[in-house]
Image (cartoon, rainbow, N blue to C red):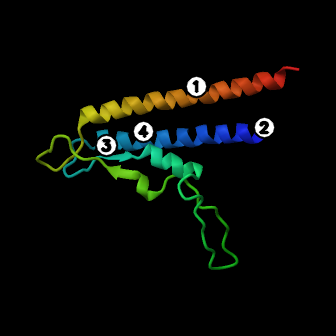
């Protein structure tokens, strides 16, 4: 029973962390909309979530070359391969690939998903609290 609760909370936590990271990437795109040669990036959310939950190849194994090294699992959920460059919808003369309409739409969509995950986590904690307080 506790493993199901733990798995669900781990999923929500990972998804929230990835949504927050995507919001940072989208904010960076918006902030650099006038920067020459800036290339718009986005987070491959589905791929990152699979990596975070261990579905894509399992956890990364780190090799210790010295017995005194600290052991680490290496699972971060934010591998380098999840950030991708977005292709330009309308090319700019200065080489910037940021389209403000696209960025605003993705930013708003990501914000809604983030709020949904927050509400889901709050609901889970409320359910757990009611289960604990009920006798």
Relative to 98, residue 115 above or below: above
Q: x and y percent of residue 117 in the render? A: 55, 31
CA–CA distance between discs 4 and 1? 18 Å
Q: Residue furthest left?
A: 93
Helix, strand or loop under label 2: loop
**Residue shown at 52%/27% (left/top)?**
116
Residue of label 1: 119
Neighbourhood count class around disc 3 (C-alpha, 10 Å): few under 14, some 14–19, many 20 upward: many
> Disc 2 vs disc 3: which is toward the camera?
2
Relative to 109, residue 96 above or below: below
> Disc 4 vs disc 1: which is toward the camera?
1
Circle nearer the N terminus (2, 4): 2
> Disc 2 vs disc 1: which is toward the camera?
2
In this view, the residue in front, 105 or 55, is 55
Residue of label 3: 29
CA–CA distance between discs 2 and 3? 43 Å
Helix, strand or loop under label 3: helix
Neighbourhood count class around disc 2 (C-alpha, 10 Å): few under 14, some 14–19, many 20 upward: few
Q: x and y percent of residue 97 in the render? A: 22, 46
Residue of label 4: 23
Quarter of the figure with residue 129: top right
Circle nearer the N terminus (4, 1): 4
């Amino acid at each position: 029973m506790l493993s199901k609760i733990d798995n669900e909370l781990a999923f929500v936590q990972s998804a929230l962390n990835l949504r927050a990271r995507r919001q940072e990437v989208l904010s960076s795109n918006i902030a650099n909309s006038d920067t020459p040669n800036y290339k718009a990036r986005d987070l491959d959310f589905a791929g990152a979530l699979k990596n975070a939950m261990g579905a894509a190849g399992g956890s990364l194994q780190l090799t210790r070359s010295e017995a005194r090294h600290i052991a680490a699992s290496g699972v971060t959920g934010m591998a380098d391969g999840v950030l991708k460059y977005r292709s330009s919808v309308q090319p700019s003369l200065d080489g910037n690939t940021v389209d403000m309409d696209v960025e605003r739409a993705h930013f708003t969509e990501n914000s809604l998903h983030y709020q949904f995950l927050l509400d889901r986590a709050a609901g889970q904690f409320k359910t757990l609290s009611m289960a604990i307080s009920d006798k």
